[in-house]
Image: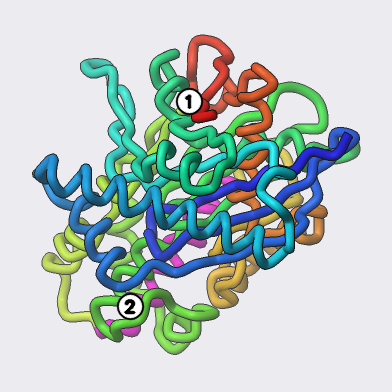
């Protein structure tokens, strides 16, 4: 029978909530409808302040947790109203929440990850069973807690005819390796849109570089690009995950301080080239020539052109070509993860996160 799930996603850019209404039937996912609700400037600032600050108060954390829980609930209800679907027809909501800290485990620490957006409020406000807090169980099992989307990529996009690579470009970017035979793999690559978003916000007051239009007017700066590519995370062996803690405006400004003055436009062009270079370097190392891109970065035409230029012999397309809407892929992934949790099936891939065993992810709020 057809089951309806809502997936809610807010990424490291903290620009808003993506909601996807997904129907699951005959082992296939169909996107029924989708909605994106931007955060207010004040709410986005509060998220970034909490995420980027070395210290924060429990008052700030608790208040923002509740505020985001209501925002997620409102977004889910708005989507169902748009699609004229009564709440009782929805099996569950899968809410990723808003990441405010991600500290992967090291040889010296067990690590931790924290996503807020109170799922109690989501379940109570919507009247729909809600599954949330997906990442910490994987981390408890020895994994990185990220990326989780590759498990959905494997379920929805694996081909028996060809090896495929799927790259999600959100605030950060992550890669999924889908061989036609054998186990999938995946890991965080590094920055996706986050540095470009931060830079254009600082210089033009815009939330993001629409279509990469600003980046397209500049020229990549070779010395700055070389410095950015020296970030130790990029040469770290998988499994690995990262976030704004490693790639942020402060880190970028430190790199710029050691160079002669570069125009803001050329910095933006360099940041675009940086993301493209990191993605293409990872793809070249794999025995494939098919790359499907999803996430907000798939709309950045300057970035897409750069990736295609760096991978001239590859098929480089959005995941739309493979049957899953590029913009809503991650929200759909958390709808799927909620389904797996309620069915008591593991939602992580040990080959991706490094967990010692498959684990049923998340907490259920009935």
Predominant SS along the magenta part? helix
Across and down, in percent, residue 19 comes to 58, 56
Quickly name the residue at label 2.
200
Dot 2: within a 10 Å radius of its alpha carbon, few (fewer than 14), some, or many (20 or more) residues?
many
- Residue 98 coordinates in the image, percent (x, y): 38, 48
Mark 1 sits on what residue? 363
339 sits to left or right of 279? right
Is residue 360 placed above or below 352 in the rendered structure?
above
Quadrant of res 38: bottom left
The label shown at residue 334 is none
For the point 39% across and 43% down, the residue is 234
Task: Name the image quarter holding the C terminus.
Answer: top right
Q: Residues within 10 Å of mark 1 (few under 14, many from 20)?
A: some
Which one is closest to the eye, mark 2 or mark 1? 1
Q: Residue 149 versus residue 212: which sits nearer the camera?
A: 149
Q: CA distance from mark 2 to mark 1?
A: 37 Å
Q: Is residue 276 magenta?
A: yes
Image quarter (top left, top right, bottom left or bottom right) of the N terminus? top right
Q: Is residue 56 magenta?
A: no
Tell me if residue 325 can be seen: yes
């Amino acid at each position: 029978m057809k089951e309806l799930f809502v997936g809610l996603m807010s990424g490291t850019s903290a620009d808003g909530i993506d909601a996807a209404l997904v129907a699951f039937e005959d082992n296939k996912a169909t996107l029924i409808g989708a909605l994106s609700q931007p955060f207010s400037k004040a709410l986005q600032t509060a998220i970034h302040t909490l995420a980027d600050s070395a210290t924060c108060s429990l008052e700030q954390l608790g208040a923002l947790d509740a505020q985001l829980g209501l925002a997620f609930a409102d977004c889910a209800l708005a989507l169902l109203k748009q699609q004229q679907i009564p709440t009782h027809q929805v099996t569950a909501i899968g809410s990723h929440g808003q990441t405010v800290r991600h500290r992967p485990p090291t040889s010296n620490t067990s690590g931790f990850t924290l996503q807020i957006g109170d799922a109690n409020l989501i379940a109570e406000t919507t009247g729909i069973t809600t599954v949330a807090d997906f990442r910490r169980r994987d981390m408890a099992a020895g994994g990185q807690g990220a990326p989780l989307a590759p498990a959905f990529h494997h379920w929805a996009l694996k081909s028996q005819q060809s090896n495929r690579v799927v790259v999600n470009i959100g605030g950060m970017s992550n890669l999924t390796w889908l061989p036609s035979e054998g186990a999938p793999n995946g890991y965080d690559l590094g920055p996706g849109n986050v540095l470009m978003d931060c830079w254009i916000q600082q210089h033009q007051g815009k939330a993001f570089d629409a279509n990469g239009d600003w980046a397209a007017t500049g020229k990549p700066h070779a010395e700055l690009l070389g410095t950015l590519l020296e970030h130790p995370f990029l040469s770290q062996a998988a499994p690995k995950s990262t976030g704004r803690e490693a790639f942020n405006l402060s880190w970028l400004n430190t790199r710029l301080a050691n160079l002669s003055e570069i125009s803001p436009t050329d910095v933006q062009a360099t940041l675009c080239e940086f993301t493209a270079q990191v993605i293409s370097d990872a793809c070249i190392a794999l025995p494939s020539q098919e790359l499907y891109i999803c996430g907000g970065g798939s709309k950045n035409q300057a970035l897409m052109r750069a990736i295609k230029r760096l991978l001239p012999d590859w098929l480089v397309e959005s995941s739309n070509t493979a049957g899953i809407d590029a913009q809503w892929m991650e929200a759909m992934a958390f709808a799927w993860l909620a389904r797996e949790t309620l069915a008591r099936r593991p939602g992580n891939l040990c080959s991706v996160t490094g967990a010692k065993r498959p684990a049923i992810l998340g907490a259920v709020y009935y």
